[in-house]
Image (cartoon, helix red, strand yellow):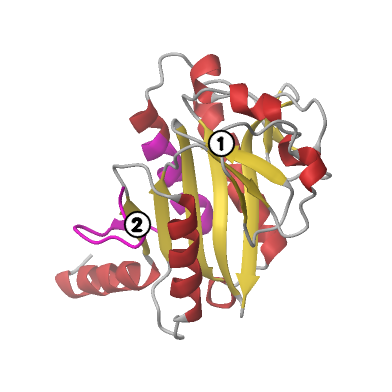
Amino acid sequence: MTGRQDSAAQARDGQRALRLRRFATLQDYGETLAAMQAFTLARASDTSDECWLLQHPPVYTLGLNGKTEHILAPGEIPVLRTDRGGQVTYHGPGQWVAYLLLDLRRQGIGVRQLVHLLEQSVIDLLAEGGVPAERRHDAPGVYVDGAKIASLGLRIRSGCSYHGLALNTAMDLAPFGRINPCGYQGLAVTQVRDLLPGWEAERVALGLLRHLGRVLGRPMQEVEGETRPRET
């Protein structure tokens, strides 16, 4: 490849790249939601797509059509209404959350295909460790031997997505027992640490980002020194 061709390829990659924002500290859920909404409302046709990778302090989130009857005993953990689809889920330290802020029209996919691709990224990540995982057509997410390891929830506004997926990595799973996860009574949950004890959280994060970029056909380009949600 000539220098000119190489420069042209780099330019195309830059245009296709997903701007990656990683946060080293726990991010308040409400502030992150507000930041996603503001980003999506302010988008123009040439706004770069972004991926935010972070973790939240303990919080239960209830989707647009979520029923409070699925929140059994929240105790001291706050419950927040949110504008994604789905029922109730739990976020907390040790769970990687990847928020995908994409122009789906520009990406050339619909919401169902996006859900499929997000699920596939987790399935392929776990396959690296020899763990067979699967999707369920009646309940979006990723499962290992019937136990849920990753949850998905999306909102589409003017053809653009926000929210994304949450991958249980190395966390306290007990709070899931105080809800009906995703609206299913008695649904078992699991996490990467219990299935692949040698995998540290950073390995999981890097692998998830790599597979997300691959299934979307978009290289990740980390943004240095910039934040969207407020760091706490």
Rendered position, 232 above or below 45: above
Please identify the residue farthest to the bottom as the structure is shown: 45
For this rendering, which residue is in front, 168 or 18?
A: 168
For this rendering, which residue is in front, 182 or 8?
A: 182
Query: Along the horizontal axis of the image, is 169 left or right of 4?
Result: right
Residue that label 1 marks: 77
Q: CA distance from mark 1 to mark 2?
A: 29 Å
Q: Amino acid at mark 2?
A: Leu
Picture disc at residue 128: none
Name the spot of residue 52 as percent of width and height, x first: 41, 55
For the point 56% across and 33% down, the residue is: 76
For the point 18% across and 69% down, the residue is: 2
Residue 158 placement: quadrant: bottom right
Residue that label 2 marks: 20
Name the spot of residue 198 as percent of width and height, x first: 40, 15
Query: Along the horizontal axis of the image, is 81 left or right of 163?
Result: right
